[in-house]
Image: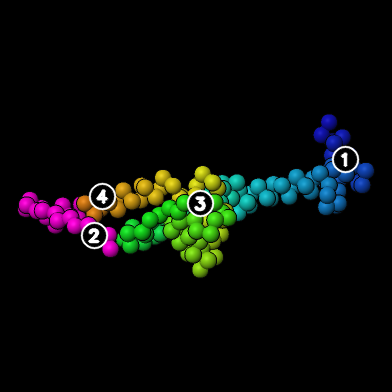
Amino acid sequence: MALVIGKKVHNGCNCAFFTHMRKDLNSLHNNAQQAYVDLMNQVQYIEVSLDRQTTKQILANRLHLKTNIDVVRWLSFQGCAFRGHDKSSGSKNRGNFLELLSLLASYNEKVEDVLKSAPQNASYTSTIQKEILQIYASRVCNVIREEIGDRKFSIIVDEARD
């Protein structure tokens, strides 16, 4: 049997193996061989591709969150209100938070791309603001507690609406 197969393989252009292997670039054999080469190429591995996309998404999320933290910090340190009356995109004044985010995005293309491409569920513009403020409040309270220690203290509150 092996001799018969050997004769058929070496028979020339009518051989089934050579027909399968053809020199045509789109032959089944060449396509399978190219698929094998691509599979063995680590740059094209699915894991490598997913890791690259995941890393890119993590960096974009960090930039988005950092921008939001900076806006919350600035507004809270200045004692400014965060929201306006109308947060719709057509509004002339959407509130200090969204307007300051827009201002920062206008100066940095990366920030603008991240803010525009963020999905609605990852806009970081509602509950995240409260969480960031709570973190700042707890830090301020901790600094005050460390400074005061066990000593007695009093707070004087005076309000004037001038």
> What's the mark number on residue 87?
3
Kind of residue at badge 3: Lys
Answer with left or right where residue 134 lies relative to residue 98.
Answer: left
How far apart marks 2 and 3 lie (CA) works out to 30 Å
What amino acid is at disc 2?
Ala
Q: Which mark is residue 108?
A: none
Q: Name the residue at 40% across, 54% down.
A: 82
Give me the C-alpha separation between circle 4 and circle 2: 27 Å
Q: Earlier in the sequence, mark 3 or mark 1?
A: 1
Q: Is residue 11 left or right of residue 115?
A: right
* Location of mark 1 (residue): 16
- Alpha-carbon span between mark 2 and mark 1: 97 Å
Callout 2 secondary element: loop
Give the percent coordinates (x, y) of residue 62.
45, 55
- Which residue position holds label 2? 160
Query: CA–CA distance between discs 4 and 1?
Result: 78 Å
Residue named by callout 4 = 138
